[in-house]
Image (tube, grey):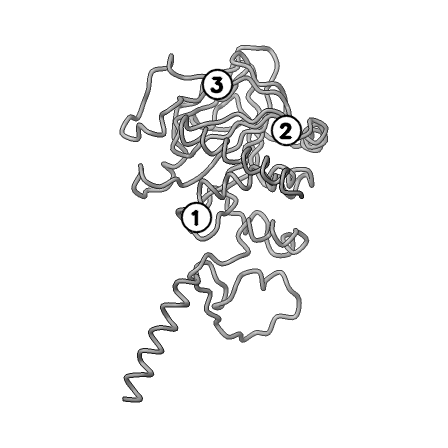
Amino acid sequence: MNAVVEGKQSDHINGIVTGLQRDGYHVVRNAIGPEIIARLAADLDKDFAATPHCEGGFYGARTKRFGGLLARSPHSDELVRHPAILAVAQKVLEPFCDRIALNLTQAVEIHPGALPQFPHRDQDMWQGPKGGTEYLLNVMWPLTPFTAENGATRIWPGSHRLQDSGALPDDEAIAPELMPGDALLFLGSTLHGGGGNKTDTPRRGIIVSYCLGWLKPFELQWLVYPPHVARHFDPQLAALIGYAQHRPNLGNVEGQCPSLLLRDGLPIHRAAIDALRPDQADALAAFFADQSGKTES
């Protein structure tokens, strides 16, 4: 990639981040080729047909949902590791963590007659302090056109700055119209909800979300993709779903990076190995140097 292209890509990513920070959401038009979306949609047809409607008012009795998309279609990886989207997620979240993680992949089908979803902030699944930390970034990828009439995601612009406001007036919400290939990004601190479907056809979409690497994800990725599945993933993807430590030493297996589970011939007994951030490694080295000086004197 030459310097001019890199510069344009960097400007593009920074523009998306600026929009998210200002409005709590941002629409990226033509983020990916519609032919990729079409192939992914075709792969998921049988799953949509076989999946029963949800139970409960939050998920929606006229809505179908299922996860584990990386095991259902290879084309889902092109959404999960979309270079620009991944770069945006890192810029938004990495000030608060050592590495980001995949929070979920979920296909959603809102059927005719579905009511609007209860407005909510996805960050509320974690009971930490709100207002100073972003916990996750959502990306909605439409498989069919999204309109206000068929259940397009409703967003309350600027609600990420109103953390003490539980509910906001309906007339302050917007429902961005999207086409397959577009992407709607919104922060975990942004009030949102699926729209009601007043048409006679379902609307389908995919949610991909990224969270801070030290959080328990909405979808337990290492159970959805156990080692015998994840060992066939690209190493970057395997790390994103949890086969990587979050420094210092968080999420280890026998004191080592969980990526060891993706290898053959593991010894039964293994040595624990430090996994520290550079600043922690420097502090540790300084500590031992100080201790050594005291001993020598």
Residue at 44% over, 63% down: 278
Q: CA–CA distance between discs 3 and 2?
A: 19 Å
Percent position (x, y) of residue 294? 28, 84
Image quadrant assignment for residue 116: top left
72 or 56: nearer the viewer: 72
Task: Check disc 2 and report the residue beneath it.
Answer: 48
Above-or-below relation of 272 to 106: below
Element assignment for label 1? loop
Front: mark 2 or 1 = 1
Dot 1 or dot 3, earlier in sequence: 3
Task: Check disc 1 and report the residue beneath it.
Answer: 216
Element assignment for label 3? loop
Above-or-below relation of 169 to 233: above
Element assignment for label 2? helix
The answer to whether the residue labelled 1 contacts the one labelled 3, judged by CB atoms less than 8 Å apart, is: no
Residue 144 appears left or right of 168:
right
Q: CA–CA distance between discs 1 and 3?
A: 27 Å
Dot 3 or dot 2, earlier in sequence: 2
Residue at 57% over, 24% down: 109
Residue at 30% over, 31% down: 163
Image quadrant assignment for residue 193: top left
> Which quadrant is the C terminus positioned in?
bottom left
Residue 68 appears left or right of 293:
right
Q: Which mark is residue 78?
A: none
Query: Label 3 sits on what residue type?
Result: Gly
The answer to whether the residue labelled 3 contacts the one labelled 2, judged by CB atoms less than 8 Å apart, is: no
Q: Which mark is residue 195?
A: 3
Q: CA–CA distance between discs 2 and 1?
A: 27 Å
Percent position (x, y) of residue 246? 46, 56
> Which quadrant is the N terminus positioned in?
top right
Above-or-below relation of 252 to 107: below
